[in-house]
Amino acid sequence: MIEVLSDSIFHLATDNTSYVIHILETGHAEHIYYGKRLKDVSYSISALREKRYARPGMGTYTDPDFPSLVLDDSLLEFSSEGRGDYKVPLIAVSLGKEGERTLDLRYKGYTKENGIKRFAARKLPQAKDAHLDAETLTLTFTDAVRMIDLQLVYTIFPSLDTITRRSIVLNRSKERITIRSLMSAQLDWREDGMKAIMLSGTWGREMEKIEKNIERGTIIAESRMLSSSAEANPAFMIEKKDGSCYALNLIYSGPHRISLSLTPHGMTHAVWGLNPDMFSWVLDSNESFEAPEAVMTYSEKGKDEAGDRIKSFILTAIMRSSWKDRMRPVMLDTWEAAGYGINEKKIAALADGAAKMGCEGVLLNDGWFGARNNDRTSLGDWHVNTIRFPSGLNDAADTVHRHGLLFGLWFEGEAASTKSVLLHDHPEWVIGRNAETNAEGRHEQLLDITRYDVQDWIISTISKISDLVRLDFLRWDLNRCYSDLYTLSGIRDYGMYAHEYICALYKILSAIGERFPDMYIETTAGGGSRFDLGMLSVSSSMVPSCISDPIERARITGNAALMYPLSAISTVVSPSPNGATRRIVDRDTRFNIAAFGVLSYSMDTTAMSRSEMASFRAQIEFYKANRMLLETGRFRIVEDGNRTIWTIANEDRSEILLLYLQHFVKPNTTAERIIVPDANESYNYRIYARSHTVSEKEAYAYPQENECYFISGDALKWAGVSLVEQVSGIGYHEGMRFLGDFSSRLYIIKRVDNE
């Protein structure tokens, strides 16, 4: 609930957290507290408020009646320029012809309403009120001289322990202004020693977990691309010295910035939102601009529970396709089987193999259109290649459907090959002043999707294909970074373009989703360059990386699952040796890792031996039997080092799956122990390893071990299970475990009746 106390104190209370704002006598918004739920804020407010008697040395006060109030040394709901606050601003503007930057925003009033205050422009995705218990508080601040308003919009989701924030600027003056920066949220703490946990990386090495102490100076994590990027995911955490933790995110798929700093006064300052280096916005008189929505949650119990809370919020209030509450389909991807050489005969054979394996759909990847023999041509020419598919695309789709499978297509709608019929006919559709002098990426040019005719063409093209073939599954991809940003589509300022581009992307994907509500839309951008809540608002799941090497994907999936639900993470089992790393990994380990998330396969079913087919069929049967748990269970990384240990548990902890992944064999090892913190102390459990395949040679030398243990829940949680020794250079004895480099076991832990 939102409590308004004395018209100057606002208590935003969820079931387990409190967020308290105080309007100072000067009209500035003081941040009082964000943390564990407080019982009676009104009783405690005088004790909670900061006391100000002496002005800090060299400090600038904004009001002569309150000379001890220095904004630079105050906990605030927003920072701005020109009035003595030198922290990274939430809002920065340029006014008039002289480009004045000073803003003096003072409190004007508030509104409180049930439900969610929707974006006026409806261009950006936003959290939805799934539980019908949301409330919204809007605080308005105005610069009475410059006639500019700033609105801070707070929406609470009480049962989800989550608060969303966003900022709105209104130009009430008669002059044009330029917004140079408008962040979505700001948090200030009067303490140091805090730690940031961020997900960074690059193509193929997405989601590297970066932990940094927030020290003097500023930490910046940002995307400068037309995507949220692999370089800096919008999700991050801030961990306090006492172990409590904030999980934070942004519902946006474009260039963004996270700025974290420790001020000289020992204050930790965080702002996040649109990247000001990639953004500016021109406002004429009586125009407004709304920043994307930020997401905040907190747990005094630490990052695991904070992560659980934000994942629960994502599942409930962000994901919204018709597949949201359905089990995701197991797809077979044609890429590894045929690449650009896919044809009518091959897809028929692959569909037959996919059905025998137990897959639920076939994704026809790149190579089905135009004259696409390689990545140098035909992207954008979205008509079937009749040489490869003489009976037409609808016949290929019918073949897949006759096997009882979903039919999917790969589509890269935002780009076109420099060598394509599309760009020959529409050179004006390319982003850039002159397409002939543009830089290229993957022999492609980006299309200006801010143009209405380009939007209509993309939506119409996919609609026609879907109507023709009854398209069930769409993979939306982008494999080119931006360059040469320049547009003739009527956008008033260069800095407005990147944001308009992302808004146009949402419009396109939303239109497709609305037109085909049962279609499964999977989004990717060269892998994990668009893995964010904005995309998840318009799709069913996201690809975190192009890299299918299972050891790399274990790190990527594990880190992504800290702050994103597994049902949003598309995974894959691909051939070994891996095409990117040349690493050899056994087929069960490839599955054991990929099972955590939305499972798919990318391999040639026509080249499989009977034993391979049987093994993959058994994997899919196991996945289907445990799909609810693997997609929606409570995920934990128990240990990470030479051995990676994951657990995933259902709500009452009666079923738990445990991944044991060994990276390298160590000689002369002895017994190992695994502890399962999520075990229910009042239960008894049986723990056993999922049957795994071994080669004929290994089976002769090392018969498959048969591990099975009975253990009480308290013993499993606190003492752990002592496993049998591994074969590690000191001889083999019957029953020992045999794991090589990059090998794993999947343990099944189930409650048994108490005896």
Image: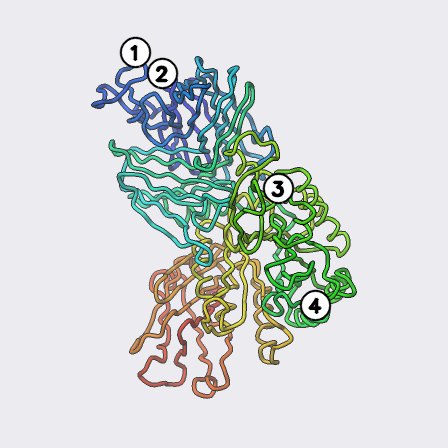
Q: State the CA–CA distance, disc 1 to disc 3.
A: 53 Å
Look at mark 4 in the image and give the residue it sits on.
343
> Residue lying farthest top?
65
> What residue does disc 3 label?
449
User: What amino acid type should be assigned to the residue bearing mark 3?
Assistant: Ile
- Give residue 92's quadrant in the image: top left
Look at the numbered discs 3 and 4 and tell me whether their residues touch, using CB distance below 8 Å. no
Q: Are marks 1 and 2 in contact (CB under 8 Å)?
A: yes
Q: Earlier in the sequence, mark 2 or mark 4?
A: 2
Q: Earlier in the sequence, mark 1 or mark 3?
A: 1
Q: Identify the element where label 1 is drawn.
A: loop
Percent x, y for residue 397?
74, 61
Q: Earlier in the sequence, mark 1 or mark 2?
A: 2
Q: Badge 2, how many Cα within 10 Å: few under 14, some, many 20+?
A: few
Q: Which of the two labelled residues, at mark 1 and mark 4, occupies the earlier sequence position?
A: 1
Q: Secondary structure at mark 2?
A: loop
Residue 747 tag number: none
Residue highlighted by disc 1 = 65
Which residue is tagged 2? 26
- In the image, is residue 412 above or below residue 710? above
**Residue 696 horizontal side relative to residue 191, left or right:** right
Q: How far apart are the alpha carbons under marks 2 and 4? A: 72 Å
CA gap, disc 3 to disc 4? 31 Å
